[in-house]
């Protein structure tokens, strides 16, 4: 009996180690995929999607091109993953805000700040602005569906604010477009080594946009 118990214990321990190793492997793979996305985003920003090569993305991580293909089968899949990664961040924040009790102006501030950080810090200014036309039809549809969901969430916050008087009455859809248009343009001029940090820019844009929404009367 003792020997059987010891054998069973060893088997359980081997199983535990195997599961732990598997989890560590998954975590390491996920971490490497994110590193690849960030390297790709830097290359896309500097050279454009069509100008950047898989070799350049891999070389920045001291990887061989063949090793990178273990994580992504081609450059288009990397592009799609960049969009998905960015949208994951935004949707998680949106969900938390929707279930929170903050006032509409504070909700909108949190969304604007998160949006700015996502497109400037997470994937170096290319998060939601990469070449959509380079995606396959299936990937394009998936990105648009999730992007539209985020936009609807912002409109709902605007509608909530207009309903309770936080924001002036107006067209929530047009105002959401104004917010997205302002924020989406930031990566066109933002320089990481510039005088303003991403947090300073996020705060300034949030102040400016929210102030305008409170005072707007026609839009």
Image (tube, rainbow, N blue to C red):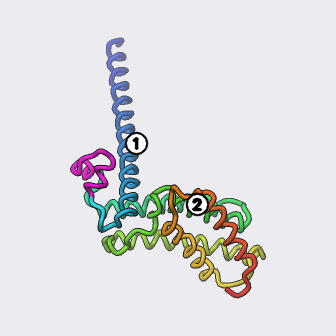
Residue at image mark 2: 114
Tell me, yes or no, whether the highlighted magenta stretch contains residue 140: no
* Nearest the eye: 80 or 61: 61
Residue at image mark 1: 27
**Picture coordinates of residue 141 (x, y %)?**
39, 73
* Nearest the eye: 1 or 82: 82
**In the picture, residue 1 is in which quadrant?**
top left
Structural crowding at the residue carrying mark 2, measured as other residues with C-alpha within 10 Å and reported as few (<14), some (14–19) or many (≥20):
some
Q: Is residue 163 visible?
A: no
**Picture coordinates of residue 156 (x, y %)?**
63, 73
- 149 vs 140, left or right, is right
Element marked by disc 1: helix
Provide the residue span drawn in magenta: 54-70
Q: Mark 2 or mark 1, which has the lower sequence index?
A: 1
The nearer-to-camera label among 2 and 1 is 2
Question: Which residue is situated farthest in the left direction here?
Answer: 66
Q: Residue sitting at 67 percent across and 72 percent down?
A: 209
Q: How far separated are the C-alphas under marks 2 and 1?
A: 25 Å
Say which mark, if any, is on residue 131.
Answer: none
The number of numbered discs placed on residues in the rendered structure image is 2
């Amino acid at each position: 009996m003792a020997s059987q118990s010891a054998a069973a214990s060893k088997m359980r321990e081997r199983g535990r180690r195997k599961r732990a190793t598997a989890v560590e492997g998954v975590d390491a793979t996920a971490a490497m995929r994110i590193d690849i996305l960030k390297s790709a985003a830097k290359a896309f920003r500097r050279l454009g999607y069509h100008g950047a090569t898989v070799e350049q993305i891999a070389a920045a991580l001291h990887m061989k091109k063949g090793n990178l293909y273990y994580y992504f089968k081609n450059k288009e899949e990397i592009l799609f993953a960049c969009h998905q990664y960015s949208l994951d961040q935004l949707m998680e924040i949106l969900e938390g805000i929707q279930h929170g009790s903050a006032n509409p102006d504070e909700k909108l501030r949190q969304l604007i700040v998160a949006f700015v950080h996502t497109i400037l810090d997470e994937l170096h200014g290319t998060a939601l602005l990469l070449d959509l036309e380079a995606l396959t039809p299936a990937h394009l549809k998936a990105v648009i569906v999730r992007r539209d969901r985020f936009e609807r969430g912002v409109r709902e916050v605007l509608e909530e604010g207009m309903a309770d008087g936080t924001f002036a009455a107006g067209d929530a859809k047009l105002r959401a477009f104004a917010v997205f248009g302002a924020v989406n343009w930031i990566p066109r001029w933002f320089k990481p080594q510039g005088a303003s940090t991403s947090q300073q820019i996020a705060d300034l844009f949030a102040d400016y946009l929210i102030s305008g929404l409170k005072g707007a009367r026609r839009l």
